[in-house]
Every structure is written in structure tokens, then in C-alpha cells.
Amino acid sequence: MVQHATGKFEVTLTPIGADDKAEGSTLRRLSVAKQFQGDLEGESKGEMWTATTEVEGSAGYVAIERFTGKLQGRAGSFVLQHGGVMTRGSPQLTVLVVPDSGTGELAGLTGRMALVIADFHSYDFQYTLPDVPP
């Protein structure tokens, strides 16, 4: 059965090394740290690679982060994989749970997360989880 989790998060991005600038694009590597509130309570750490172009509003990124904490009271960890592009300001983003990455009471977790960036960062997580951890 698909379940639903929502809440807010704070994110800290820290550059790793120097930007790689070449004709037409800039590559950047960043460490990512997030604090989650709401149905997800805990933190995540990971890395992100970004590519920006000379065209305003066009860019791409990939990231991997490991969440550790609780999902609606169930403790454990899992990994999220991000892939996003922005074409002249029009975003497309996919954030998925890496298969079989769930641990503890989150073993067997699958799902997809939507991120919303407005006045603050929030998440909308659609997921499935076995009734009894293996």
C-alpha cells in the first residue's frame, strides 16, 4: 500500500574543490547535509554534481544522499538518488529510493520524493514499506 509523508527540510551545500570551467559550461561538486522535520525526522548526507551552462536557467544535477532517522516512527536509513535538469527555467526532477538500500525498520522501502522550493524547502514522499521488517 502506498503511503504518504510530508514535511520540511533545511539544506547546507558546501563546495568540494574548485569549479571546472570550460567553454559553455561549469561543473561543480558539493557536499550536501540536510535536516528533516515532519514525517521524516533525521538527517542526510551526500554529494551533488552540478553543470550550469551559458544559457540562463539551463542546468543539470545528480546527487546521492543517505537519510538516517525515522520515517513516521520507524527507525533506519535509506539512500536517495537525484537526477534533475532545468531547460531555460523549466525543471524536471526525479528523486528515487535506491532499491534495497533501506536498513532497520526501513528495510524493503521503495518510493519517490518530490522536492518543493518556495519560501522554504519541503518534501512530499510517496513510499511503500513492508508491514513487518525482514
Image (spheres, rainbow, N blue to C red):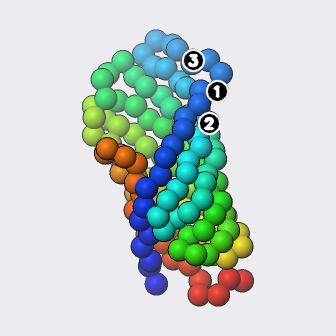
Is the residue 69 above or below the residue 34 in the image?
A: below
Is the residue 105 above or below the residue 120 in the image?
A: below
Whether the residues at callouts 3 and 2 have beta carbons within 8 Å, the answer is: no
Task: Tell me the residue at 57%/56% (across/down).
Answer: 80
> Which residue position holds label 1?
16
Residue type marked 1: Ile
Q: Position of residue 82 (x, y in %)?
A: 51, 49
Whole-Å distance between the Cαs marked 2 and 1?
A: 7 Å
Q: Position of residue 99 (x, y in %)?
A: 62, 65
Q: Residues within 10 Å of mark 1 (few under 14, many from 20)?
A: few
Q: Residues within 10 Å of mark 2 (few under 14, many from 20)?
A: some
Whether the residues at callouts 2 and 1 have beta carbons within 8 Å, the answer is: yes
> Which residue position holds label 2?
31
* Residue 41 relative to residue 2: left or right: right
Is the residue 30 above or below the residue 72 in the image?
A: above
Question: What kind of element bears circle 3?
Answer: strand
Question: What kind of element bears circle 2?
Answer: strand
Q: Residue furthest top?
A: 23
Residue type marked 3: Asp
Is the residue 117 above or below the residue 23 in the image?
A: below
